[in-house]
Amino acid sequence: QQQVKQSPQSLIVQKGGISIINCAYENTAFDYFPWYQQFPGKGPALLIAIRPDVSEKKEGRFTISFNKSAKQFSLHIMDSQPGDSATYFCAASYHAGNNRKLIWGLGTSLAVNP
Amino acid sequence: GAGVSQSPSNKVTEKGKDVELRCDPISGHTALYWYRQRLGQGLEFLIYFQGNSAPDKSGLPSDRFSAERTGESVSTLTIQRTQQEDSAVYLCASSQSLTYEQYFGPGTRLTVT
């Protein structure tokens, strides 16, 4: 299975709250799990990424939690701010011959209310 | 340095016309990707270039879609006989070979009337 399932589709959080976005996968060949952030009218940009041999990675207010046995990973945004309002995509990466492919989740539209 | 650029930023065309979309990747990036993003949807992979060759064209939705890359730099995505369902944002990304980080351009918004 090449799919990456992402939830929720949309999320509304109050300023200062915690935003949590979840993703699940099936293919154990995936060896890298990035999260991308996309603002309206812009292309996605890499936010944070994790390898499956690590259970957690934190960069500022953004944390990825990874559960290898459950094949799930999640993005936590602490102290959410209105400027975090964007669409977030999880992805899973694997080697395919002479290429590294990314399989994308369908995205989560996050709105942080002031 | 300069990021990925795409042109035009917006394109409105009549059904049945051909369109060309251009991507200028980051200098030195050997890998180049085209994606399609319909309104409110995720990213749909179209084609991947390594250098000037395209080892993975599996995402091209029909033979109306084609792409080329020259000089291991600029790429053009051509859509022939456009249909209304082709309306979407077309995103280009580039990366150093075999890395997970792709750098995206701002996209071309295509509207077929």
Image (cartoon, coloured by chain):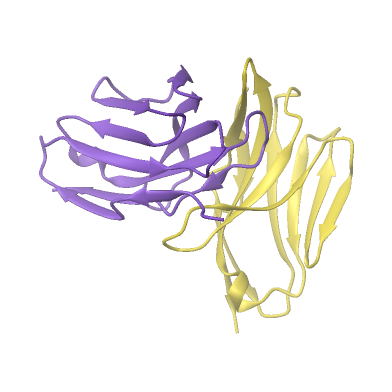
Chain colours: A yellow, B purple
Name the outermost residue toward the front. B71
Q: In screen coordinates, is B77 left or right of B94?
A: left
**Residue B4 in the image, given as x and y percentages of width and height:** 48, 49
Name the outermost residue toward the bottom. A114
Determine the residue positioned at 69% across, 49% down.
A22
Determine the residue positioned at 34% across, 27% down.
B67
**Residue A63 in the image, given as x and y percentages of width and height:** 80, 58
Give the tally of numbered discs.
Answer: 0
Question: Residue B97 or A50: which is nearer the viewer?
Answer: B97
Q: Determine whether B25 is above or below B2 in the image.
A: above
Q: Quadrant of residue A66?
A: top right
Determine the residue positioned at 35% across, 26% down.
B68
Q: Quadrant of residue B20?
A: top left
Q: Determine whether B14 is above or below A25 in the image.
A: below
Q: Is residue B37 in sight in this rendering?
A: no
Q: In screen coordinates, is B67 left or right of A68?
A: left
**Residue A52 in the image, given as x and y percentages of width and height:** 83, 35
Q: Is residue B91 in sight in this rendering?
A: yes
Q: In screen coordinates, is B43 left or right of B19?
A: right
Q: In screen coordinates, is B32 left or right of B81?
A: right
Dividing the image into 4 quarters, which one contains the N terminus of chain B? bottom right
Question: Residue B87 or A17: which is nearer the viewer?
Answer: B87
**Residue B30 in the image, given as x and y percentages of width and height:** 55, 31
Determine the residue positioned at 51% across, 63% down.
A39
